[in-house]
């Protein structure tokens, strides 16, 4: 499917890698080709009109981190070498989904579904699983990172904020990659429930995200913020279980998590029925290939008077990638980070014909621009009063383990 879809200039493949949960809708989805697109310079209000004008159809796309500038009086002046637009959505010509061992092909142009199926079956897979090693450079040195964390802790100590998600970029220039092959390597090493291969002409997202930003099913909104990370030990089951207990009992991680949960509750309350927002799981521990994570679930009943843009304005950027209070920490993020986040810490997903939607958090991801031959990935963590700069730096490296392995060999 993916090799077949990559011949289109625009395609989006979402894969849950067989992680099962009550929120799961399908195992994987592929959207490719276009029958309509949102202009590259569109606003959230333009997106509302686009959704209304294409009611009853599938819509796929992304929200970049800097959509924040449409929500709050903020700006973004850092360099952005990947150059995804801040906002982009499209109505696909073909949507393919796998659910309950059945492949569904929905066609919205003159193509024939059976012909598409045969074309997929007959596609020659030309991807390479042997990417040459890539030399990765840090945007900031370890010493610069540690000094920045100490400065951020000073902001926390004097009351500017309670928690801030701080990210750093690693990058490579003048390189050529096989995006599908690299995506396959990444998700083979690190299969995650919100993985995504997303191509927008010459820009690529290879995403192995474990985190859901926001889902709508009927009138129910669900957000599942992640805060709290500890590395796994696959060589010793008993030690791995002790690591789970350590994360479960970590006051530092619980304090991070509960602050984000409170932030998400506040965000959802802006667009949900009064009194309907609830925390249905607090401090859940979930295991992924490289790490154990602490995940909470916050839900609420959507007030039907609100449009998609109202929901995004209330909830985006996600609390797990910003902090509290949100507006102030976004100002500090701009002050202390050295790269524009772009699509990183944004969201990719879909809006269904019925108006339901599901979007991930773009983390644990490789981004690539084939025109300028620039590749980058960003990684970060939540900084609180309890944070130790050296441990925060090590946590960043742990989160990037799979990415470093596929890029550096």
Image (cartoon, rainbow, N blue to C red):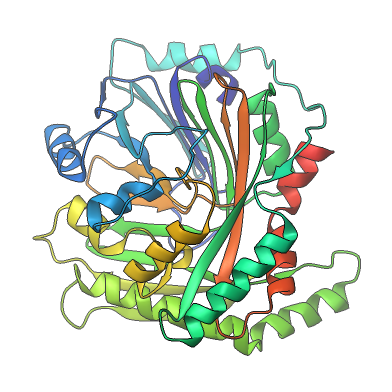
Give the left or right position of residue 402, taking residue 272 as reference. Answer: right
Residue 289 seen in this snapshot: no
Q: Give the image location of residue 204, x and y in percent.
A: 53, 30
In the displayed structure, would residue 246 be above or below residue 264?
below
Q: Nearer the viewer, residue 377 or 140?
A: 140
Q: Tell me what residue is drawn at x 48 percent, y 77 percent.
A: 163
Q: Nearer the viewer, residue 40 or 111?
A: 40
Q: In the rendered image, which quarter is residue 148 located in?
A: bottom right
Q: Tell me what residue is drawn at x 25 percent, y 29 percent.
A: 38
Give the left or right position of residue 235, taking residue 328 as reference. Answer: right
Residue 403 seen in this snapshot: yes
Q: Residue furthest left?
A: 305
Give the left or right position of residue 140, taking residue 271 as reference. Answer: right
Q: Give the image location of residue 324, x and y in percent.
A: 40, 75
Q: Give the image location of residue 87, x and y in percent.
A: 32, 39
Q: Give the image location of residue 106, x and y in percent.
A: 35, 26
Q: Quadrant of the C terminus?
A: top right
């Amino acid at each position: 499917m993916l090799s077949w879809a990559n011949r289109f200039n625009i395609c989006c493949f979402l894969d849950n890698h067989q992680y099962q949960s009550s929120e799961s809708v399908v195992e994987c989805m592929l959207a490719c080709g276009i029958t309509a697109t949102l202009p590259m310079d569109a606003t959230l209000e333009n997106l509302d009109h686009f959704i209304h004008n294409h009611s009853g159809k599938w819509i796929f796309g992304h929200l970049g981190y800097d959509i924040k500038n449409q929500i709050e009086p903020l700006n973004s002046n850092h360099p952005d070498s990947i150059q995804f637009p801040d906002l982009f959505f499209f109505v696909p010509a073909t949507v393919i989904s796998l659910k309950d061992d059945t492949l569904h092909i929905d066609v919205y142009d003159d193509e024939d579904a059976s012909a598409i199926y045969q074309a997929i079956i007959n596609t020659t897979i030309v991807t390479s699983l042997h990417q040459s090693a890539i030399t990765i450079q840090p945007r900031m040195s370890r010493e610069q990172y540690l000094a920045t964390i100490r400065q951020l802790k000073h902001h926390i100590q004097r009351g500017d904020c309670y928690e801030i998600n701080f990210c750093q970029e690693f990058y490579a220039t003048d390189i050529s990659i096989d995006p599908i092959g690299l995506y396959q390597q990444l998700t083979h090493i690190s299969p995650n429930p919100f993985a995504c291969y997303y191509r927008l002409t010459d820009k690529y997202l290879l995403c192995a995200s474990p985190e859901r930003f926001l889902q709508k099913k009927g009138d129910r909104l669900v957000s599942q913020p992640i805060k709290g990370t500890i590395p796994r030990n696959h060589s010793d089951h008993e030690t791995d279980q002790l690591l789970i207990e350590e994360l479960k009992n970590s006051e530092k991680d619980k304090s991070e998590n509960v602050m984000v949960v409170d932030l998400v509750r506040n965000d959802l309350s802006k667009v949900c029925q009064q009194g309907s927002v609830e925390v249905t799981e607090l401090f859940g521990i979930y295991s992924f290939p490289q790490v154990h994570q602490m995940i909470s679930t916050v839900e609420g009943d959507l007030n039907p008077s609100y449009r998609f843009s109202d929901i995004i304005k209330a909830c985006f950027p996600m609390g797990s990638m910003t902090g509290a209070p949100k507006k102030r920490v976004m100002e500090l993020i701009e002050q202390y980070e050295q790269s524009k986040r772009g699509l990183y810490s944004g969201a990719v997903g879909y809006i269904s014909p019925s108006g339901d939607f599901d979007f991930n958090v773009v983390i644990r991801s490789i981004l690539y621009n084939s025109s300028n031959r620039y590749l980058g990935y960003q990684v970060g963590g939540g900084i609180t009063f309890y944070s130790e700069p050296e441990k925060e730096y090590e946590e960043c490296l742990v989160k990037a383990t799979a990415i470093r392995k596929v890029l550096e060999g």
